[in-house]
Amino acid sequence: ARKRALAVTELRRATMRAAAGRVGADSTAPLRVVTARWESRAGVAQRLAPSTIKAYSGVLHRHVLPVIGDIALREVRPSQVVDVLVIMDRSGLGPASQDHALKALRAVYRMAAADDPWLANPAAAVPAPRRVLTPKVVPTRGQVLAMLAGAPDPRTQALVAILAYTGMRIGEALSLRW
């Protein structure tokens, strides 16, 4: 009975929107409002993992919404999405972080487009930032021995040895528990 009542309520709202000339989602709502709706529904609507929703929400709230969050969903333009990426770049955030913000914004628009197929996704028109691959520098055996000899204490020696001989990243090595 509860599901039926909710369905009837949603049908009435959709009918009123259609009668007012607004088909599907309310694309006049600010991006900030639509994002809040996305956060509460993305797990079911897009089958996203809770960790993905949390990561996308974080990047949206930190970087996207402060710049374009008050603009109506249908009014956001690709150039404004590029503005977000430029601000992120000037803040020292790399292409991976910018790409993450782009993916998060695309996810919000995908959900909105499910309600309003005429809604354009401005993030879809923006290419992903190019990642510059830098060659990895692998120290020689002599350089590793020199780092071990120059380490100030046994703990630092252990950390250098773990990093050099296992290939772990620094975060992985620092999270080890003895």
Image (cartoon, rainbow, N blue to C red):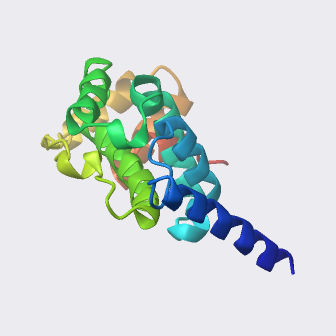
In the image, residue 172 sits, relative to residue 98, either above or below, namely below
Between 117 and 106, the one nearer to me in the picture = 117
- 141 relative to 164 in the view: left or right: left
The total number of labels drawn is 0
Q: Is residue 66 visible?
A: yes
Q: Could you say where residue 111 lies in the image, as x and y percent from the top left?
A: 46, 60
In the image, residue 120 sits, relative to residue 98, either above or below, namely below
The quadrant in which residue 132 appears is: top left
At a point 57% along the width and 40% down the height, the residue shown is 33
- 30 relative to 105 in the view: left or right: right
At a point 32% along the width and 18% down the height, the residue shown is 91
At a point 44% along the width and 60% down the height, the residue shown is 23
Q: Residue furthest front?
A: 19
Q: Could you say where residue 100 lies in the image, as x and y percent from the top left?
A: 36, 45
Q: Is residue 52 visible?
A: no
At a point 46% along the width and 54% down the height, the residue shown is 22
Between 88 and 11, the one nearer to me in the picture = 11
The quadrant in which residue 16 appears is: bottom right
- 33 relative to 77 in the view: left or right: right
Quadrant occupied by the N terminus: bottom right
Between 112 and 59, the one nearer to me in the picture = 112
Q: Could you say where residue 105 lies in the image, as x and y percent from the top left?
A: 39, 46
